[in-house]
Image (cartoon, rainbow, N blue to C red):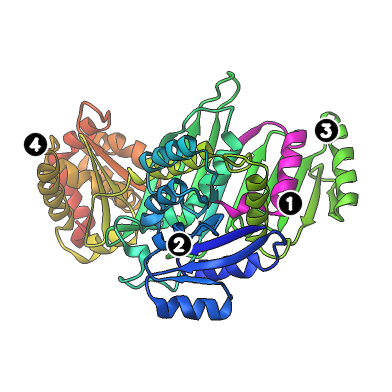
């Protein structure tokens, strides 16, 4: 029997304690939080012998406690886990286990020095659907994975400035929801690929935290085969389908509700090459009572599996952790220490690309010699409602860049303003130039030719100095024509 103590008595701790009731070899004996009143209320709902109001450290001195579940705020996980392991307590830590790879390195070192089991409570790896996905991927049914897309976007009711989501250190959507996406991506790339290259990172900011984040990651294949691209998207200000999609060269795996998965869908391309895989999937559908459908026109076969939780979405991870502890393991084979490090490494890499500031709600990121401006409703509203807004924005960027890097941005305010306006209003600019090009003659035609490559939608405007931005010369040449551009756009300029 594993005797559990819980550190932290919030909502997650209640869910853990409720699930623990159903674990045969687990027993709750202690609860710790900051106020005895709250500890007594928790024990009234989930009876336990020992109550602490010192934040958890008295609990660690209790020789009757075998393992602790840490459900403290994110920023306290690392310290709590290290102290618990040094006290000889096995640790199951709520996600994210840490805030940085540096913190995870400290946990790994402590675990290996003490020989104490540590596992991040990444619940998605311990549910029935996960086991079936692993089986299908191991069989190679859908072929080699080419692309992975993860999205976990919610419209959270917890959007008050005093809520943890708005804490500039431990808040933001990447640590809260993005870590689930990172876990799926890590599993599907671990072993075959090295660390990812962050190719795109797009954000919406609320205060000092990201309310939305979307990033594309590129994984280089160490064996020389085709590389893999992965998308991570998460939000607390927008509701979207919460999906995991795995694209293989022979089929697709889809998982609705990626952080609480109970359904898995497989679409297999029917070819001579996939006959064996089709037969194997047919047998799997019989075993797991999956539904099948055939699209003869597309030559595809679809399999839908519904696998409810064993008890709930916490039960699997608690049971697995208990088995690891009973077997004397120092880390989980399903959620090992290096997996936790890889997951927070993904999040850390994306967070490093967050905007440095928000000007009238416009997200702006400052890198050395490059400024990135997010083209969203905030930027459109600012330019639409503010006469001369592009120059005002350019002036702000120059001031902030100077303060951040202690040097001047080598892009003229006029060139920067022109680039912003052309990217944002490219359709409007081209429409109006089409009308006047015959009247202004050859210079107009040359101007139109130089702008032609810009006629496309742009989510992020990358404004770089000439040495790092090949397009800078175009905007520098267009800058003298800014008055004409301002006349074309009217108040929007």
Q: Are marks 1 and 3 in contact (CB under 8 Å)?
A: no
Mark 4 Cα-neighbour bin, 10 Å: few <14, some 14–19, many ≥20: few
Residue 315 occupies which quadrant of the picture?
bottom right
Q: Is residue 211 visible?
A: no
The residue under label 3 is: 274
Residue 305 occupies which quadrant of the picture?
bottom right
Q: Mark 2 or mark 1, which is nearer the start of the sequence? A: 2
Mark 2 Cα-neighbour bin, 10 Å: few <14, some 14–19, many ≥20: many
The residue under label 1 is: 265
The residue under label 4 is: 407
Q: Measuring from the top left, give residue 207's x and y in whole percent.
A: 27, 62
Residue visible at 74% across and 51% down in the picture:
265
- Give me the C-alpha separation between circle 2 and circle 3: 56 Å
Q: Mark 4 or mark 1, which is nearer the start of the sequence? A: 1
* Disc assigned to residue 421: none
Tell whether 340 sits left or right of 244: left
Q: Measuring from the top left, give residue 46's x and y in whole percent.
A: 58, 75
Mark 1 Cα-neighbour bin, 10 Å: few <14, some 14–19, many ≥20: many
Q: Measuring from the top left, give residue 100's x and y in whole percent.
A: 37, 44
The residue under label 2 is: 59
Provide the residue span drawn in magenta. 121-147
Residue 136 colored in magenta in the image: yes
Q: State the quadrant of the C terminus.
A: bottom left
Residue visible at 40% across and 47% down in the picture:
457
Q: Nearer the viewer, mark 1 or mark 2?
A: 2
Q: State the quadrant of the N terminus.
A: bottom right
* Nearer to the camera, 392 or 215: 215
Q: Is residue 13 visible?
A: yes
- Give me the C-alpha separation between circle 1 and circle 3: 17 Å
As helix, strand or loop, the secondary structure at mark 1 comes to strand
- Give me the C-alpha separation between circle 1 and circle 2: 44 Å
């Amino acid at each position: 029997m594993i005797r559990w103590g819980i550190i932290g008595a919030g909502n997650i701790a209640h869910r853990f304690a409720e699930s623990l009731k159903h674990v045969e070899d687990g027993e709750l004996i202690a609860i710790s939080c900051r106020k005895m009143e709250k500890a007594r209320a928790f024990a009234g709902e989930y009876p336990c012998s020992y109550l602490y109001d010192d934040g958890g450290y008295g609990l660690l001195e209790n020789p009757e406690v075998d393992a602790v579940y840490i459900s403290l705020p994110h920023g306290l996980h690392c310290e709590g886990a290290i102290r618990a392991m040094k006290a000889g307590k096995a640790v199951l830590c709520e996600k994210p286990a840490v805030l940085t790879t540096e913190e995870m390195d400290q946990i790994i070192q402590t675990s290996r020095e003490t020989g104490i089991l540590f596992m991040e409570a990444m619940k998605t790896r311990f549910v029935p659907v996960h086991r079936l996905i692993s089986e299908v991927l191991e069989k190679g049914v859908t072929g080699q994975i080419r692309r992975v897309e993860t999205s976990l976007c919610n419209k959270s009711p917890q959007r008050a400035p005093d809520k943890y989501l708005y804490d500039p250190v431990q808040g933001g959507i990447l640590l809260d929801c993005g870590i689930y996406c990172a876990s799926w991506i890590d599993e599907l790339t671990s072993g075959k690929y090295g660390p990812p290259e962050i190719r795109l990172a797009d954000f919406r900011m609320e205060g000092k935290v990201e309310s939305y984040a979307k990033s594309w990651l590129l994984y280089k294949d160490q064996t020389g085969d085709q590389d893999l691209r992965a998308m991570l998207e998460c939000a607390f200000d927008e509701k979207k389908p919460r999906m995991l999609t795995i694209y293989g060269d022979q089929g697709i795996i889809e998982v609705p509700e990626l952080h609480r998965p109970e359904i898995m869908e497989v679409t297999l391309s029917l070819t001579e090459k996939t006959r064996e895989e089709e037969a194997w999937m047919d047998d799997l559908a019989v075993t797991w009572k999956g539904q099948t459908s055939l699209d003869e026109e597309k030559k595809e076969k679809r399999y839908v599996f519904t696998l409810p939780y064993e008890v709930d979405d916490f039960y699997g991870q608690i049971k697995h952790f208990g088995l690891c502890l009973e077997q004397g393991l120092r880390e989980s084979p399903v959620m090992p220490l290096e997996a936790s490090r890889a997951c927070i490494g993904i999040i850390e890499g994306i967070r490093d690309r967050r905007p440095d500031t928000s000007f009238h709600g416009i997200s702006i990121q400052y890198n050395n010699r490059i400024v990135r401006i997010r083209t969203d409703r905030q930027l459109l509203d600012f330019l639409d409602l503010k006469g001369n807004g592009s120059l005002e924005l350019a002036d702000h960027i120059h001031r902030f860049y100077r303060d951040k890097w202690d040097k001047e941005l080598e892009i003229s305010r006029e060139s920067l303003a022109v680039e912003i306006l052309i990217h944002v209003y490219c359709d409007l600019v081209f429409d109006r130039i089409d009308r006047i090009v015959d009247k202004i003659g050859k210079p107009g035609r040359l101007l139109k030719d130089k702008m032609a490559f810009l006629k496309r939608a742009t989510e992020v405007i990358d404004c770089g100095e000439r040495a790092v931005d090949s397009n800078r010369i175009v905007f520098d040449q267009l800058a003298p024509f800014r008055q004409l551009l301002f006349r074309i756009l009217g108040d929007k300029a």
